[in-house]
Every structure is written in structure tokens, then in C-alpha cells.
Image (cartoon, rainbow, N blue to C red):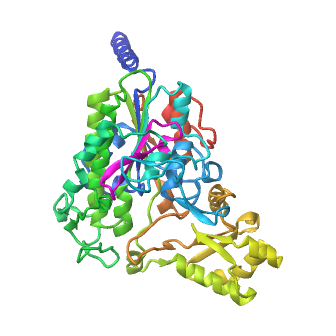
Amino acid sequence: MRCFILMVFTFSTFWVTGQTAALPAQPKLIVGIVVDQMSYEFLYRYSDVYSDNGFKKLLRDGFSCENTNFNYIPTYTGPGHASIYTGSVPAINGIVSNDWFNENTNSYTYVVDDKDVRIIGADTTGGQMSPKNMLTTTVTDMLQLSNQQQSIVIGIALKDRGAILPAGHTADAAYWYDGRVNAWVTSSYYMDTLPKWVQTINAEKQAQNYMNKYWNLFLPASAYKSSTADSVPWETIYIGEESNEFPHYMLFNGNSESIKATPFGNTMTTSLAQAAIKNENMGKDNITDFLCVSYSSTDYVGHAYGPHSMEVEDTYLRLDRDIASFLTYLETTVGKGNFMVFLTADHGVSPTPQYMQSLNIPAGTTTEGEMVAKMNTILQNKLGEGPWIKAYTNQQIYLNDSLLNKKGLEKKYIFNLMHNDMLKIDGVSYFLLIEDLSGSTLNADVKELVINGIYPKRSGDIQLLYDPYWFEAYRASGTTHGSHFSYDTHVPLLFYGWKIKAGETHRDIGITDIAPTISALLRISEPNGCVGNVITEIIK
């Protein structure tokens, strides 16, 4: 009996050692996947319609951090991508929103705006984009710094900010889709000419081939058990359509921007990602390359129809097939054990308020315009003609400093004048003076999220928070995100591939923990603004 046990032990040790020895010292390729607007529960809500080789494969054979949350507000796309890859928060990396008010220029700044560069891949205005507004390095930057930029680093997304921010300051390229010119483009920050392989893909006119057709359900309607009825009043009716139910006609009138609001935008993204690996020879040597892929269509579809719609369910089951195809491609071209994938999201999503109301759950919407009008009325009734407010965005008020200085008034005085009246407005839960949050009765955990989202040079003077399932809508239907509530902060986080053992943890993980964990796996320095911690379960 003792001999038998010894023999099994010896064989097991040899097998494990042999397997470990077969793995490269570092992964040949890391693929970071960010799904735009993916709540944690989507991993499980749609499991009945997922294939075995997409999300289920990542869960079955990878490591899942089941309680991963964002640790700041606002939970938007730009800050989300920046936080994932910098291991930092807006208070440090400066990406406080998708756009913010610039008090020096009295104008709004888009998160990746850069007037010193030009678009590459199209003869048009716009597309002047780069990562220059991000103040800290990314894990992709640190990889490049660790080996004198011998790694190949590329970012790909339909959205410019989803491609640019993850790839970092030292990237070889970032590509995004411009439907106005029906092409994948980049900017002169990265190159002067679009690579031949990207030009070839643009010549294939993938978006046009999908459009002027119908978006039908992938499965029989009876299979969509996790969704509401197909046609409900809180879903958007697109221009050119007569209803919000399937099938949806994808009209191409020379402009393919609307492809982004269909699952086929994700399929196009997968196609470009695979082409980048092939044509740039990524994962072909012992120097780690990094491909940052963001799936943006889930966000466009989610905004229009809400997270309980058949459209969102159909988009996710199609994305599941795209991811399955992508994983198979990686195994075939880079090789099993030679690559590592992580998958997460840049934020979650709120249920559609009208749907919640139909279930007698408190919810509601307002608009930026309505809020500005109410705030101006309060101040004008107490102080006279303004304008007392210079700008309002991201639920933050930028007071008119010039007028306040002229009148000899302090910001705290203005805040106190407004406070009680603002709290009488339906849906408003807190009205906070940013420079004096210590005096607030706000829950300590939520207060930390607010503080982590404030970068003084780009943030406003007063922060407004809403009740659960309340938000500022820009249309009467659909939904959005951005709050401190778990439906917006709780997202999936999966690691798979090179040296990753199957398992899961339910302890609290911050979104800022991703970058230091990858840094530890690669044995390189963390990004310079990193505040996250290594997820030790993965390292062990």
C-alpha cells in the first residue's frame, strides 16, 4: 500500500512539474477584455443561453473574483477604463468623467481630446484623440518601460476612449470605429499612416455588409426567459423604426454609426482584434505583448433598451459566441498556456426606472436642464440675477467664481443657501460641498467613493447624489449608469490562461486591484498612481 501511494505521488509531482516547465516564464500575450456596461449578474442571468466555450469556459477553467466593485464615482466609461489599467482612481489619474468643464477655457474637455494630433485613416475633421489627459501610467506603460518598449501594445474598441486609455501613453497603436467614414481609424499620436492590414479590413466594409438588413433574435423567442416582453414602453424606438420590437432594421444611409448599437459591432471588434494578433505578430516571441479589447456595443444597446430587455440578452449571448471564437483563436495561434486573459467591465447599469415603477419599486428620472433651472431659480430668488452657476455636469455644480468674488461671497455661503431647497427635490438624496465633505452625514463608504472621484482642477464645487434607481436621463426611454449603488459598481472579474488556476473568491476586490495583480504576475513595477492591492489568490 505504501509503495502504491509513493508511486502515485511521484507520478503526480512529475506531471505538475512537467506542466509548469512547459509554460513560458511570462505569458507571450495578455488580452485585457473590458465589456462596456456589464453588471456582475450577467455572468449568471443568461447562463442558460450561453455556450460552453465563452463566459462559462472562463468561469469553469479560470479564476473569478465574485465581489469586485468600483471604488469611486462617477461610474462611466472613461474613468472605468482608466481605473482598470492604472490601478488608480480619478482623484489621482485625473479622468473624472467622459468629459468635464475646464474653468481655464470656460469650455468642456472630452476625456481623450487632443487638438495637437490629427485623425489617421480618414479625410475628415475630428478624431483628434490621445491619452494625454490621463495623468498617470498604465500597466501597459509599465510593461513597455520594463523592456525598452519591445512589447507590442495595441488598444481596440468601437469607442475611442475604450481603445486609447487602456493602451496607455506608450502604446504602438489604438484603433476605434468612426461610423461617419465607415472605417477603423487612429490618430497621429500613434502613426502617420494606417497599416495596410487595417486598410484591408476597412475595404471589406464589414459594417455596410451587416446593415440594410434585419437584426433578428439569435435563438427562438421562447429561449429568452431572463427578459421582459419584446415591446415595452420604456425601450427606445430608433429613428426609421416604427416600434421597439424585433426584428430591428439596420438602415445604412452612408453612415454606419448605428452599427455600434447592435451586437454586430462586437463581432467587428473581435475580427479586428484577431487581425491585429495575426498581422502584428503578437504573442510570437518570449517578450510579453498586450492587447486591450473593449466591447462597446453592450453599452449602446443597454442605454437604449435597458438591462432586462430581449435586445440586451441577445447581445450578450452573441458576445458569448464572439468570446468563445476569440478564445479558440488564441489557443490556435498563440497556444494554450502561452496567453492570459482577464475580463471585467467599466461599470454596471441601472434598471430602467419606468420598469421599476411598473413593479412598484421607487425610481425616477430628471434631466440636467431641469436641475439647472431649479438651481438657478433658488439662487436668483435669494441673490438676484446671476448667472451664479457657470456649468453643471456629472452631477457637479461649477459656481461662477468671478461673480462670487465680485460680490464678496464664499462658496460655502452659496452652498448653505441652496442646501435645504435642493433636498426637497424628488430623487435628490445628498447635496455636498466638495471642499468640506467632512461635515457631511454621508455614509463613510459612500463618502470615500465621492472623494476618490474628485480631482480639484477638473471637478466642480458641489456634488449632488440621487436616490436608488434615480438618474438624469437624456431621453424618455432606456437607462444609464454612474451612481455609487451596487448595480453600477459591481462588475465581473475573471482571469484565465497562463498560470491561472481554476477557482473563485468572494472577498472584497477593488477595480484598482487589477493593474497591480498583473504587474505582480509579470514581475514589473506597478503604475505610478496605483492604489490597488495584489489579488493574492491569483498569485498563489
Q: Farthest residue toward the top? A: 3
Viewer-proximal residue among 82 and 187 = 187
Location of residue 273 in the rendering, given as x and y in whole percent from the top left corner: 33, 41
Q: Is residue 171 left or right of residue 379?
A: left
Q: Residue at x 67, y 84 (%)?
A: 421
On screen, residue 66 above or below 441: above
Q: Farthest residue toward the front? A: 123
Viewer-proximal residue among 409 and 127 = 127
Q: Residue at x 37, y 18 (%)?
A: 22
Q: Farthest residue toward the bottom? A: 381
Location of residue 401 in the rendering, given as x and y in whole percent from the top left corner: 74, 71
Viewer-proximal residue among 175 and 539 = 175
Viewer-proximal residue among 238 and 199 = 199
Q: Is residue 177 left or right of residue 454?
A: left
**Residue 443 position by quadrant:** bottom right
Q: How many marks?
A: 0
On screen, residue 213 above or below 142: below
On screen, residue 365 above or below 296: below
Location of residue 342 in the rendering, given as x and y in whole percent from the top left corner: 42, 40
Residue 174 magenta: yes
Could you tell me if residue 349 is visible in this image?
yes
**Residue 7 position by quadrant:** top left
* Magenta range: 166-188
Residue 455 magenta: no
Location of residue 349 in the rendering, given as x and y in whole percent from the top left corner: 44, 63
Q: Is residue 115 left or right of residue 207?
A: right
Q: Farthest residue toward the right? A: 408
Pick the quarter of the image with the N terminus: top left
On screen, residue 262 above or below 370: above
Could you tell me if residue 535 is visible in this image?
no
**Residue 59 position by quadrant:** top left
